[in-house]
Structure formats: structure tokens, C-alpha cells
Image (tube, rainbow, N blue to C red):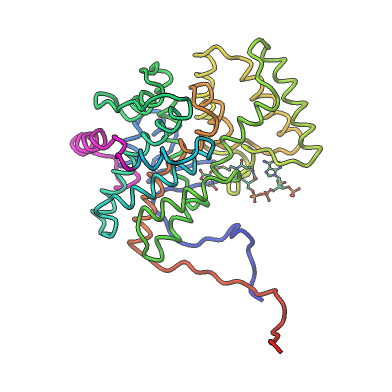
Amino acid sequence: MSEMKKGLAGVVVDYTAVSKVNPETNSLLYRGYPVQELAAQKSFEEVALLLWNGELPTPQELAAFTETERAGRELAPNIKAAIDLLPLDCHPMDVGRTAVSVMGANDEQTADSSPEAELAKAKRLLAAFPAVVAYDQRRRRGQDLVEPREDLDYAQNFLWMTFGEEAAPEVVDAFRVSMVLYAEHSFNASTFTARVITSTLSDLHSAVTGAIGALKGPLHGGANEAVMHTFDEIGIRKEETREEAAARAKAWMEDALAQKKKVMGFGHRVYKHGDSRVPTMKAALDKMIEHFDRPEMLGLYDGLEQAMDEAKSIKPNLDYPAGPTYHLMGFDTDMFTPLFIAARITGWTAHIMEQRAANALIRPLSEYNGPDERHLS
Ligand SMILES: CC(=O)SCCNC(=O)CCNC(=O)[C@H](O)C(C)(C)COP(=O)(O)OP(=O)(O)OC[C@H]1O[C@@H](n2cnc3c(N)ncnc32)[C@H](O)[C@@H]1OP(=O)(O)O
Ligand SMILES: O=C([O-])CC(=O)C(=O)O
């Protein structure tokens, strides 16, 4: 029997030039650039162009994309109608998955897999998806659709369409940082799903729809939502000091680990000494805690992190600081993973284009362990 690698752990299956995750140096490079530098200096729009094209845009390229992106933000009538038909208590990831599927049916270039068409579709998806998340949160709150504004950038407009008011610059910046950090992460489960689907020569929207299904699970993107459920289970008490909250969180974690529970937002398949993106996202969370004056949230955060570190030396992943950041911004908890979709559309589509350019059908082998051959009498 050939060696089996459950979960493909440690298996290298292809080359990629999109990003490099290095657990030894705890670094993440998008097309060669450290993600921390991009998060400090670049807009999400610039990072998207970097991931797709391999280079940062020239001012002219950025201006052209800005125009396309701002013109493509409206919710198409049949996507709005499809969302309106979905139950208010279905998960927002079901809404996001359905919306991308309808976008695939709408797109005139769905069957065109030329590099130019793939890039154009990726840009349209990036531009159109925020309206899905924004409208879904609003309809669940009994609020009307807010039309996009072309005078706002991607992050500003996303928050505008969700909350119907202009967000403070600090909030916009933390949101932008989260989008940049969530944009890309090599062969994670959802990206690999997108590449598997692409490898059959299926279309870009099908690959993204499948990737959304993979992202939904709590072992992957669904963890950012699960982190908030943990905070809620411990109990968020605004009147509490940071120290009081930390003590309760520590006790909660010790109890959870004694019961051998998996606590979402901690651990990673590749990083074993901490996720390269966490310090940058934690700095954004700190700014939100200060902006909204919520020190007790920091107490909960620190308490869980310290207790996990002391008991198992397992470090937080990106979902851990992202969850409470989105909560403080005002997003409903089950909207957090759709926010991850909005960002990861960039990485997924970059990988879809890369897979298509050097394709091989992805079809591994299995070792049969069912009943021996038998026959109908
Ligand atoms: C953006 C992202 O998608 S990042 C990932 C988000 N996912 C989560 O936060 C879910 C929680 N974390 C996990 O389930 C895991 O750490 C994974 C799935 C991310 C990575 O898992 P793997 O590399 O397969 O490691 P595995 O799950 O085998 O864990 C190794 C050991 O650490 C323990 N462990 C790992 N993560 C956790 C955790 N979050 N809580 C408690 N124990 C954990 C496991 O129980 C296991 O212990 P054991 O050897 O005593 O059985
Ligand atoms: O790389 C992974 O396995 C998961 C992850 O952190 C991501 O997709 O951002």
C-alpha cells in the first residue's frame, strides 16, 4: 500500500505563484510582498489587482479598475429576488453561495474561460458581492436595501451599504485591513476546492460557489463566527473590567479543554507557532476596542488566548481577532464568514486562473477497505 496522507497533510500538490505561506519564518507573501506591508499601505482594490495580475497596479490601471468596481456594485434584480425568496433564518453563507450561483447564470461570459474573460468575471464578482452581504444583514433586521455610492471606496461603501451611514475612518481602516488579510492563503481547503472544480474545466462561478461551501465549515472560515459564539457563551458584560473578563474567559477555556473541546479560532494546519496575520489583525482589533471603548472585550480575548497557550501552546489563527473586530463594527455574527467570502474572492479567482493556465485534472487515489468481492446469488 502506498503511503496515505489523511487530509493531505504535508502533501505538496502543485506550484503556485499567488502566495507563499512560510510557517518557519511565520511569514505570508502575496506575490512576493509581505502581507503586513500590504495591510499597512495598500487598499483592498490594489491588493486584488496584485493577486490577479502578479504586480501592483500602475495609477492608470488602478483608476480603470476603480471605475469598473464602482460601476458594478448594484444588486441585480434577479439576485435580490433570489435572496428575498430565501428564509430569513437560513444561514447567510447559504445566501452568499446562492447569490454567486445566480451571478454565474447571469454572466454573459460564464462559458468563456479565456484569461481576459476570467479576469473580467473576477472583477465583477468582487464588485457585486458586498451588496449581497449588506442587503442580507439589512433584510434580516427588517431594513431596506441601501444603494451603493460611487464616491466611496470599496471598504467605505461596504460599510455604507450595510449600515446606511458613513463609517468612522478608524472603522473603515480596520475593515480594509481585515479584507487584505483574508484575501489569500495558498492551498487552504476552499481554494483547493476551487482548483479541483476548475481542474474539470468547469466555470469560474461554479468554482467559487463550491469554494463558498468549503469555507462555511467551522474548521475553516466558519471559525470567525464560532469565535463570537464562544464570547457570547462566556458572556459579554460591558460593565466588567478587562481583568474580570479575562478571569472568566480563562476559567471557561480551562473547563472547555478539560472536556476535550475544540475551541474555534485556535490552531492551524500549516502554522504551528502562530498565524502570520494575527498580530496585524489584533492591532486592528485593539483600535476598535479603543474606538468603541470596550476594554472588557480585550479581557475576554486575552483570557482565552492565555489559557489556551498555557494548557496546549496552541496559538490563535486569523479568525480569532477577526470575529470580535466584526462584532464591534456592528456586523451580526452569522455575517462574519460572508465577509471572508468578499475578501477571498480575490485569492480564489487568482488560483482559478492559475489552475486553468497549467491544468491537470485533480483526481487522487484511495485505498479500498470495504467488503471483499461478493456476488448476488
Ligand atoms: C482562516 C482559517 O480557516 S484558519 C482555521 C480556522 N479553524 C479553526 O479555528 C478551527 C479550530 N482549529 C482546528 O480544528 C485545527 O487546529 C485545524 C483544523 C485548523 C488544524 O488542524 P490539524 O492540523 O488537522 O490539527 P489537529 O486538528 O489534528 O490538531 C492537532 C492537536 O491539537 C489539538 N487542537 C488543534 N486545534 C485545536 C483547537 N482549536 N482547540 C483544541 N485543541 C486543538 C487537537 O485536538 C489535536 O490534539 P491531539 O493530538 O491531542 O489529538
Ligand atoms: O490556510 C488554511 O488552511 C486556512 C487559512 O488560514 C486561510 O484560508 O486563510
Q: Position of residue 260 (x, y in %)?
A: 78, 42
Q: Is residue 267 magenta?
A: no
Q: Nearer the viewer, residue 354 or 201?
A: 201
In front of the other: 179 or 53: 179
Name the foreground residue: 128 vs 252.
128
| Residue lying farthest to the right in this orientation | 258
Q: Is residue 211 left or right of residue 218?
A: left
Which residue corresponds to the image point at 45% horizontal and 25% vertical from the top-left? 142
The answer to whether 75 appears left or right of 239 in the picture is left
Q: Which residue extends farthest bottom?
A: 377
Q: Is residue 52 magenta?
A: yes
- Number of marks in the rendered image: 0
- Splitting the image into four quadrants, where does ligand 1 fall? top right
Magenta: main secondary structure: helix
- Magenta residues, as a range? 51-78
Q: Quadrant of the N terminus?
A: bottom right
Residue 147 sits in quarter: top left
Residue drawn at (76%, 35%) of the image: 256
Where residue 242 appears, as percent x and y from the top left, is 66, 15
Q: Residue at x 53, y 25 (%)?
A: 327
x, y percent for residue 77: 30, 39
Picture coordinates of residue 168 (x, y %)?
Answer: 40, 16
Instruction: From this view, report whether residue 270 is shown above or below residue 71.
Output: below
| Left or right of residue 39: residue 302 | right
> On screen, 169 above or below 264?
above
The residue sitting at 48% across, 25% down in the picture is: 141
Q: Point out the image quarter for the C terminus.
A: bottom right
